Image (tube, grey):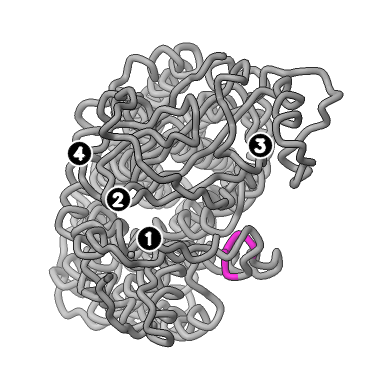
Amino acid sequence: MADQSANNAPHSQSSNSFLDRLKGFFGFDNDVDPDELRNSKDIEIHSWNGPNDPENPFNWSLKYKWLLTVTVCFISILTGLPAGTYGSGNDWMEEKFHVQNSPFPNLYWATTSWNMGAAFWPLIFVPLTESSGRMPGYFVAYVILVISLFPSAFANNFATLVVTRFFGGGASSVSINIVGGSISDVWLGEKARSLPMSLFGFTSVVGIALGPFIGSAIVQIHKSDPWRWIFYIQIIYNAALIPVFYLILSETRPDVILKKRARKIRKETGRPVYAQAELNKVNTLKLLQISFQRPTRMLLTEPVVIFFTLWISFAWGILYLFFSSVVQTYSTNYGWGVMATGLVQLAISVGAVIGTAINPIQDWIYLSSARRNSEKPGKPIPEARLYTAIPGSLLFAAGLFWYGWASMPDVHWIVPTIGITAAGIGIYSIYMAVVNYLTDAYEKYAASALSAASLGRNSFGAFLPLASPQLFSNLGFGWAGSLLGFIGIALSVVPVVLVLKGSQIRNSSPFMRESMWTSDEVDEVDEPSAEKVPTAEIPLLRSFGRDNAVSWDFLENPTTKTGVVTSLQGAILSKRRTMDPLKATITLSARLDTFTTINTLFKKDPKDDDVWYDPKEAPTNSLNQYDIDNLGTLDLKSLSDVTFHTLLMDTVKEERIHG
């Protein structure tokens, strides 16, 4: 979409340096005043130059998209490793710092500290990347992680480790949380994102699970102060890779790219050109308030979020519990040392590999469900995300039983290791199911739902393993595994209930209805009245969405309070909340059997073979997005059954129109 004029805007020049974006990350970007901009009469809104704009991340080359995807997933592994490598040096740290680690595992407090940082930091910093960009987020977090490793490496007391690992865990979690956003920025559509997201889920689990093996290998090589070398090695490779990542990665956040381009135009031409994101900028303190309040509210009031958080939290807690229990069981039963027990814990990574290999089947099932979705025809059913997670969750529980009862001196070590592998498959499948289902079910509030789940799972990862030594010592390996397995079975009911009753649960949840762009989100719809209708026709400009569907954007005359656009007969706009100019996006979805009607109206041929369908094909119940020119002349009432969407600022209203 080309620049779009509306009539004395504030003008300021700004640099596009990384330092300026870094300032923006911390909320010090005072380049423009959004309130002043919104009240201006002479501004130009800058957006993409059509659907093929080369700077749009969706249009980047396939080769670079995969390079970026693999790089950010590699970052996910590297930032997760310190969580698990630490424990390999326990024997030496116990002696060095005079910390009593038995019967209570006091040395684990440093891992608890890491996970508590991982639980809370994303609530503060990840929302800031939505306006500042992914790149500053990655590098601020990554540099903080590297810096936190220095005092850990040179610590002279245990308290230093506990404190510094809180910062390291927080920075690590922020980096990992940004990865998913980067993948969504560059891959267009659910089908294209399927494999990249599977890879991200794999690296999220494996990054942590590989830690004990990497740590034990370092300890095996460096006999003098081996626990310090665990941190030295991580400092060396992480610091060395910072410039490499800087050269490979590019900003992927569309809003930030457009802001950068608008600033460049302002600087070079003096024209009052601004990106829409600059007009919609939210106060940093309010953004942080929302990022804390909404996840907390959902975690306390939303049954789906509560039970999904318990489900993933228990699985995540078991992932960390294996760090200590594997050492305990294999050293007791087989007399193994640090290196051998580190190798055994590779079984979790093997399980994640198997889970990743199975995940394309789950994605196929999910995408295929669109054909039988009567609630929202043409859109996959959210509960279809859970089909393979049900056997995966049961396999997770079975793996815990297997691991516990097979942990005996007269049973070959490979037998309990198979149980760990089964649990690893389950952990991966549960993780992917929770992330994908919460994203689909809560749509606009997906980030808040995922933040709530992240808070819970990292908290379980912080405290559940503290009970491991006493649990396995007092109950015995078999019954300890059984207790954990029974809890796993009980939590496996969660996805089963959602698959059976998902639609009813979503319809009865006020938060879900609100988050899925329905009338709860906006004020009651008003019929048009004489004083509200704009006196001049509002121009509609085409833009291209994530699914190749064409939408039309328009900017309302700032002197108009509100109203129904007269050129869109039958369309209903939601009542305005503010006196600000209205930015709306219009998207039309129509049944396939209305193709002939639409074609007759416009006398246009299809523009995108991926979107349009042959009118000679039999009608279906699937709603599809159509590329239609001259939407302003369309009488929606002439269509038999369509869905009309309007986006007002950050709010969407959906109305069903029947001819």
Q: Amino acid at mark 1?
A: Ala
Q: Picture coordinates of residue 161 (x, y %)? A: 20, 70
Label 4 Cα neighbours within 10 Å, binned few <14 / some 14-19 / many ≥20: some
Q: Closer to the camera: disc 2 or disc 4?
A: 2
Q: Which residues are magenta?
A: 55-59
Q: Is residue 14 above or below residue 123?
A: below
Element type at marker 1? loop
Tell me the crowding category of disc 1: few under 14, some 14 to 19, or many 20 or more residues within 10 angstroms, Cα based: some
From this view, report whether residue 479 is shown above or below residue 117: above
Callout 2 touching callout 1 (CB < 8 Å): yes
Residue 6's disc is 1
Q: Earlier in the sequence, mark 3 or mark 1?
A: 1
Identify the residue at horizontal 38%, vertical 16% (top origin). 507
- Tag 2 or tag 3, which sits nearer the N-term? 2
Q: Look at discs 3 and 4 and give the one toward the viewer.
A: 3
| 2 and 4 marks in contact (CB < 8 Å) | no
Please state which amino acid type lies under the numbered disc 4.
Answer: Thr
The one nearer the camera, 89 or 7, is: 7
Q: Tell me the kind of residue under disc 2.
A: Pro
Which is nearer the eye, 281 or 352?
A: 281
Residue 626's disc number:
3
In the structure shown, which secondary structural element does the residue marked by tag 3 occupy? loop
Residue at coordinates 43% horizontally, 81% vertically from top-left?
264
Compare marks 1 and 4 and give the one earlier in the sequence: 1
Is tag 2's residue or tag 4's residue first in the polypeptide sequence? 4
